[in-house]
Amino acid sequence: MKQSKKSIHSKEVSLLLEVKLHDIGEGMTEAEILHYFVKPGDSVVADQALVEVQTDKMVAELPSPATGIVKELLIDTASTVNVGTTILLIEVENGSGRAEEATAAKTPPAETKKLAATTIKGPHRIMAAPYTRKIARENGVDITRVNGTGPAGRILEVDVYRFMEEGSNHISAVLETAATNTLQSTPVIEATPAVAETIPFTGIRKQIAKKMTQSLTTIPHVTHFEEIDMTNLLALREELKADGASISAVSFFIKALVVALKDFPVFNAKLDEENGVIILEKEYHIGLAVDTTLGLIVPVLKNAHKKTLLEVNAEMKELNEKARLGTLSGNEMRGGTMTITNVGPLGSTGATPIINHPETAIIAFHKTKKCAVVTDDDEIVIRSMMNISMSFDHRVADGATAVAFTNRFAELIEHPKKLWLELI
C-alpha cells in the first residue's frame, strides 16, 4: 500500500496553458501582435510580460497567467487576431496554472519529469512602458541590461538613452581610429540608383488609418471656420502667470467649450442609427488629440464640467505626458463626447479635422498671430488672432447651428469675464 502511494506521487504531470487574446478595454474585437518578449524554451513567471499588442486605441502587454516554460508561439508578429485567439502555449506543472485556461492535453510523465528537472527560476519582470521598449528595440538595446531609475526600478526612456550613450562612449575611440585608418584607402564606388524604402503599415499607424476610414465613410463631414480675437485672453494669462498660476490657453478653451456645449448639446452627442435616435450626452468628456512618436493618440479628460480651471490644466498636462510615454490606461482613452486638437504650436493656420467616430464634432485650434484689424470705429489696430476649424456630422446638425455654436465659444474667449461669470 505504501509502495503504491509512493509510485503515484512520483509521477509528474504537466499541462499546456493557452494564453489567449482577451478584451482589454471598450469591447475590442481584435488586436495586432507587435512583439514577443519571450521565445520557445524560455522560463517565465506569473505576471511576466509575454507579448505586446496594438488595439485601435492603445498598446498593451499581455502577462503570463502562471509560472512555466514557453512551449510555442502560435501567431506571427504583425498579424491581426480576434479576441479569444490562442497566441502562445505555456507548459506548467499541474496545479500551477489557471484550470479554466489549461488544455486537456497532458505531456508524458517521462518528458514532464525531464522538464521539471531542468527548469530554472524565471527572470524577474522588466517594468517598462511599451514606448520605452520600442525605443530599446529600434536601437538594438537589450532592455534586461538597462538599470531602471523610475519607481520600483521601472525603466524610463531616459535610462535607455543613457545606456546607449555609455555604450557609444566606450567604443567611440575605437571607431574613430578605424575610420581614420581606412579613410585614405577607401576605394571610390560608383553611385547606384536609390532604392525606394518601404515602411511596415502596421501597429498604431494601421489602426489610425482604420479609424479615419471608418469616420470618413460613415459620417458626412462639414467644416466651419471661424476667427477669434485672443488678445484679452492672452493678457489675462499673463496676469495670472505673474501671480504664479501658469494656465495654458487650451485649458480655457476646454472650459469655454463645456459652456457652449451646454447651450448647443447637439455637438456633445452620438447618433444611434440602429435605433433612430440622437443621444445627447449629459457628461462632458473631452478628447485631447496628442501627436506622439507612435502616432496620433487621443486620451480623454473626463468630467470637464466638474473640474476647476486649475484641475483641467493639471490633468491635461498629465494625460499629454502619459500619451507621449505610452503609459495611458484603457479607461483614459475611451468615453469621449467631443474631441479637440491643438495644431497651433505646429504653425497650422487652417485644416479640416476628421471627427473621432462616433462623436459628432471636433475642433482644431490653429496658430495665433498678430494681425491688423479694423475696429467698429474704422481704426486699424494690432490684435492677436486665431483661426479655429470645426468639423461636424451634417446628419446631426446644420451649418447655422455650427455657426451659432462657434460664435458662442468665440464670445467666451474674446471676453474672458463672461467666461468667469459662467464658471462661478
Image (spheres, helix red, strand yellow):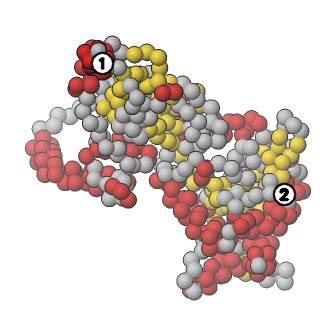
If you read the primary sequence from the N terminus, does the residue marked by circle 2 or circle 1 appear first?
Answer: 1
Query: As shown in the figure, which amino acid type bears the numbered disc 2?
Result: Pro
* Front tag of 2 and 1: 1
Q: 252 or 271, which lies in front?
A: 271
- At x 36%, y 21%, the residue is 14
Task: Report the front residue among 94 and 22.
Answer: 94
Q: Please state the horizontal and vertical placement of residue 18, each as a whole percent of the image.
A: 46, 25
- Residue 359 position in % (x across, y down): 75, 48
Quarter of the image for residue 341 reads bottom right
Q: Residue at x 82, y 43 (%)?
A: 271
Q: Residue at x 16, y 51 (%)?
A: 170
Q: Is residue 180 visible?
A: no
Q: Which residue is mark 1?
A: 5
Q: Secondary structure at mark 2?
A: helix
How far across and down, in percent of the image, does residue 42 sit?
Answer: 30, 30
Could you tell whether 222 is left or right of 147 in the image? right
Residue ID for mark 2: 265
